[in-house]
Image: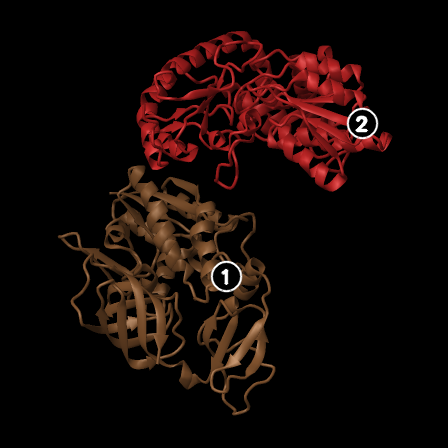
Chain colours: A brown, B red
Amino acid sequence: MKILAAMSGGVDSAVATARAVDAGHDVTGVHLALSQTPEAVRAGSRGCCTIEDSRDARRAADVLGIPFYVWDLAEQFREDVIDDFVAEYAAGRTPNPCLRCNEKIKFSAVLDRARALGFDAVVTGHHAKLAIDKDGVPHLSRSVDNAKDQSYVLAVLTAEQLRYAMFPLGDITKEQVRAEAAVRGLAVADKPDSHDICFISNGDTMGFLRSQLGEQPGEIVDADSGAVVGEHQGAYAYTIGQRKGLRLANPVNDGKPRYVLSIEPVDNRITVGTAEALEVTTVEANRPVWTGGEPPSFPWRGTVQMRAHGGLADAAAEIDADGNLLVGLLTPARGIAAGQAIVLYDDSQVVGSATITAARA
Amino acid sequence: MSEVYLDHAATTTIRPSVIESMAAAMRDTGNPSSLHSAGRRARKAVEQAREQVAEATGAHPVEVIFTSGATEADNLAVKGGFWARRAIDPRLTGLAISPTEHPAVHDAARFLQQHDDAQLHWLAVDPYGAPVPDALTRLVETGTIAIAATMWANNEVGTLADIPAIARICHSGDVPLHVDAVQALGRIEIDFSALKLSSLAISAHKIGGPQGIGALLATRAFTPVPTSHGGGQERRIRSGTLDVASIVGFGVAIVEAERERDVETRRLAKLRERLIAGCALLDSVQVNGHVADDRAKAHPGILSLHVPGADADALLMLLDEAQIDVSTGSACTSGVSEPSHVILAMTGDERRAKQTIRISLGRTTEAEDIDRLVTTLPQAVERARRASGYQPERE
């Protein structure tokens, strides 16, 4: 097959590309230039996709002996991922930009362009397992490395998109990926992983949002007493379940820490409460995407994941006529925010994904 | 299937005679600045090459300053020239630059604007990208222009500037004119003295010499402030141990290039005609710059094509896949093609600037290469248009 390999300059995509080459495919490497200030040379492990990353990707392609190009998708990335990220926070929700990038950039803009140019599939270094059965139905499941599993951010992809995707790293751990890179002579074997959000290179999400949305001081209110317990500089910067950075001027003195329970963007108010108040057992979600192309039978029972890391619970789900999901958690969960994805799993296999609209006790 | 190289404006095949002469030079030891016999041998080789460069360009040997390439030569002329002129007369803060210049001139000028308060005056260009000489007349009369700079042959679209006319205007106004002649060398007769230019930049690897060596031609009166300080070589304008082997190679290349210039120019012009005829069959493709072979107006070996609806990147990739090497204009380092500033200056059309490819012919180009490209283009263009979401206009 003629495969387009998305090479970020990191070790995962380098090894994934190497595996595609070994499998006998006709592979071309592409580095996605998504940053609008690419001149920056990478420092440490935050952020991604600087000139240094581009060079690392190119060198990996050189070692593998495949053609290499850089595709400039910075404008589209700004519109579909960065602007969406800011807008979601402004609306009081908590977005996951990696989801949006997979959905709109990697497996949409890139995939469409690749197919138009004659490629059969896009390969990436995501940690997940993907198999397409003989009927063309995709089966996406967790990688063997639980800590690095990225099936959560891939669950937003439709069956149609998954049919043109390849994830060769699903059967090995991160350690094994690095070991394989070293054996293959890929210089990125020791390159640190990038954490946090790729377009916020210093890791300061709050600072970034402040630079985009400006300071908008507002009240922090206690859920039980109704009293104003503090002031914030912009409700957009907070997320459900957040405890750090609250700086309550007049905290309720009962010895219990306070967490963000809700964010009201219109009144620019944050409500805080105790840990118990954070617990939810019902989650509503909309715009479901079914990995296999068809919804499962309802009522459904399995495991759900409601955050990129953690946020797991056994659950039962129902669907209404408009395609909205009502999910009952069998164990309460905390820090469940509107805007995040809720991914449904049958054991380790992804059933589908939907966007959380509400969560309550 | 063999590779078809049609990016000679980026770099061209090194001449076998150059390789031999360089290898021979490398086998001897000597720093041309040394006083002893080893040094003198190296010095002799350098001076011989200097005379070859001078003769080929109508300059005096003392006017030839060897540099690491045309970029360094352009920087010396623009930045060094500006600083030198302003030091003599603080009112000389202006730079008259064509907007179609190579980044080596363009960015050097911008640097001066941002860091040295230079007043940047962009010359008007015609729709083919040639600077309008009259635009310079008024500027020169202000008495505030430190340096004027215009390229002879545009590297992206091949349009030639009317250097004699521009030089006359600058000379009569006592404004030093710097000419980037990188693409003109070997294709157009360069007579540095007769044109009364102040400075000129050339590069070896565009004429079949090695990469990494070029020259700044500078009259005795033009002493730019150095951009790099050190041992004082090259009239104290360009310090650094001379790259003897590369200089020798440059000399050999320039002699050969001059010797074959007439014949080669005519040969290339015919190939360019063949290419244009082949491209005429493509749907809606246009030429940026001059179509007809006019030795006074167009470089015989450069053709810039506007392919509406196709991202240049996508087209390049498809042609690359078919083993055909072409480009979008200036080679760049980040791997992402910027929209051509030359096309922008000529047409103001940003989309056109992103849908333009450049095909450039050279010494090793044959008719078969043109034919390979012409047969491959239709499908590549169609595919690239699809990949770019092109919807052809319906009747």
Single out the residue that lies furthest toward the bottom: A254
Q: Position of residue A11 (x, y in %)?
A: 40, 56
Instruction: Answer whether residue B381 is visible to the viewer in this image.
Output: yes
Q: In which image quadrant can residue B244 be found?
A: top right
Q: Position of residue A18 (x, y in %)?
A: 33, 50
Identity of the residue drawn at 47% across and 32% down:
B351
Q: In which image quadrant can residue B34 be found?
A: top right
- Bin the neighbour count of mark 1 within 10 Å (Cα to Cα): few under 14, some 14-19, many 20 and up: some
Vertical position of residue B258 compared to residue B76: above or below = above
Across the whole image, how many numbered discs are drawn on residues?
Answer: 2
Residue identified by numbered label 2 = B144
Please tell me whether mark 1 or mark 2 is closer to you in this view: 2
Q: In which image quadrant can residue B256 be found?
A: top right
- Which of the image's four quarters has the N terminus of chain B? top left
- Classify mark 1: helix, strand or loop: loop
Residue identified by numbered label 1 = A45
Q: Is residue A348 left or right of residue A336?
A: left
